[in-house]
Image: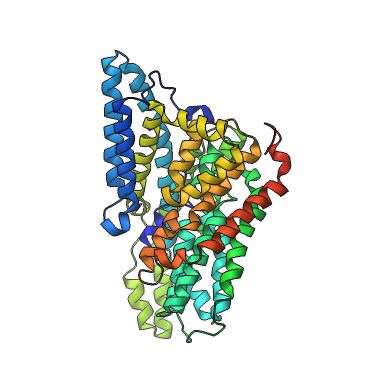
Amino acid sequence: MKIAIGILALIFGTFLSAPAYAAVPELDMTNTTIGFFALGIFVLAYILVMGEEKLHMRKSKPVLVAAGIIWILIGWVYTQQGMQDSAEHAFRQTLLEFSELMLFLLVAMTYINALEERRLFDGLRSWLIRKGFSYRSLFWITGILSFVISPIADNLTTALLMCAVVMKVAEGDKKFIGICCVNIVVAANAGGAFSPFGDITTLMVWQAGMVAAQEFLVLMIPALVNFLIPSIIMSFFIENRKPSAMSESVELKRGAFRIMALFLLTIATAVACHTFLNLPPVLGMMMGLGYLQFFGYFLRMTLPGSLARKKAMAERVGDQERLKRLGSVVPFDVFSRVSRAEWDTLLFFYGVVMCVGGLGFLGYLGLMSDFLYNEWNPTYANVVLGIASAVIDNIPVMFAVLTMQPEMSHGQWLLITLTAGTGGSLLSVGSAAGVALMGQARGYYTFMTHLKWAPAIFLGYIASIFMHLWLNASLFDLYGTV
């Protein structure tokens, strides 16, 4: 489950405050050769990112180079104008935003790595397999669990866990695995939309100060509609039969549930720092890394005594297999969990943040904001951006919106959170969960498998938007009409 560590949905866009997103450009370069060249470099880089599956090239490579080229161009122009201090300040401001993002992500990834190493995810998969559910029951169980778990564990990790269950239980059944993966992606993305920890888009909006942590809950019913409509349609195409009986026994390693408790405490600390003290949430996350380090120390110090007791019990019953396993136990090491973080993802985020920040400093995001939110109705703009996230990815879409800082009502900020978070479900390449499952279930879950159900998913997407507009109509009053 290496990719499961990749983005937490757990995945966090940690930023200090709303005004810190954009450095105001002192030179309008949107109609210059330099500006067009920088824009072309970003488009080319993102085309390469979208072709990651076919090209077998890490997604961080093109955006890292693109970010460097864009800021070199900015620095060169501003130096020619004797304004190099402005370019340096803008770069440092954008870099600070990423630094908080990286530290936040690193802690989250470390916890997920630790839970994986303690076999907590394997234990959940084993329990589901032993129950012997029918295909239709398994379809609904994995979908519902994806919807429920993703607000805490993030949409990517949840999707990979549920996909592993389906692949194990229905081994070789291409049709069932394919439709289940579609359902899991939709459910995980929908579940992540009503929690600040479920997806990067919700984390970005929360930590930019646009929506308070508890206010995301108003999106729960719209998100549920987003998941249920396509799932109900797809369920009619599931054969109501049982897979062949299977058994799998998984023994959790010592401290698995306590590490989960520490992870929840870490999230609570981050929320408290931001909500009550107005401090960056990364402070709480780094403090949470300290919790895990202390617990790791406890596990190492008590390991000899624990092993001695377990070996004595295994010897009494003559369990040679257990004795062999105990002989290969190694001490828990927090820093080995840190080293296994998905660095490609962190570097990809660096590239995206720096590219979008650079384009904003060139003036392109100002043009985009004026076109979308002044010439268009904000509702139409947010719905279209959600659909665009299925192609472009929701990370640059949401970062661009937050950088533009359009004047919108509270309901509109919740709407863009919902659409950017769930719009990626329209295509398999539109979300991290979909891309990861195409790799994990290669040959079973493909672009065309997902595209077949796009009309049903689109119905859920539109229905969830209308549900939000209806249920939360009072939140759209700040700037007039919806």
Q: Quadrant of residue 299?
A: bottom left
Residue drawn at x 62%, y 35% as measured from the top left: 276
Residue 35 visible in rendering: yes
Q: Position of residue 135 (x, y in %)?
A: 53, 79
Q: Quadrant of the C terminus?
A: top right
Residue drawn at x 58%, y 65% as measured from the top left: 230
Residue 99 visible in rendering: no
Residue drawn at x 46%, y 65% as measured from the top left: 450
Q: Quadrant of residue 31?
A: top left
Colour option used:
rainbow
Q: Quadrant of the N terminus?
A: bottom left
Residue drawn at x 44%, y 31% as measured from the top left: 365
Judged left or right of residue 315, residue 150 is right
Give above or below for 407 relative to 85. below
Between residues 231 and 298, which one lies in front from this camera angle? 231
Q: How many marks?
A: 0
Judged left or right of residue 478, residue 170 is left
Q: Position of residue 20 (x, y in %)?
A: 48, 28
Give above or below for 295 relative to 438. above
Between residues 388 and 325, which one lies in front from this camera angle? 388
Farthest residue toward the top?
Answer: 82
Q: Position of residue 226 (x, y in %)?
A: 60, 58
Q: Quadrant of residue 379?
A: top right
Q: Position of residue 93 (x, y in %)?
A: 40, 27
Between residues 324 and 377, which one lies in front from this camera angle? 377
Between residues 16 and 336, which one lies in front from this camera angle? 16
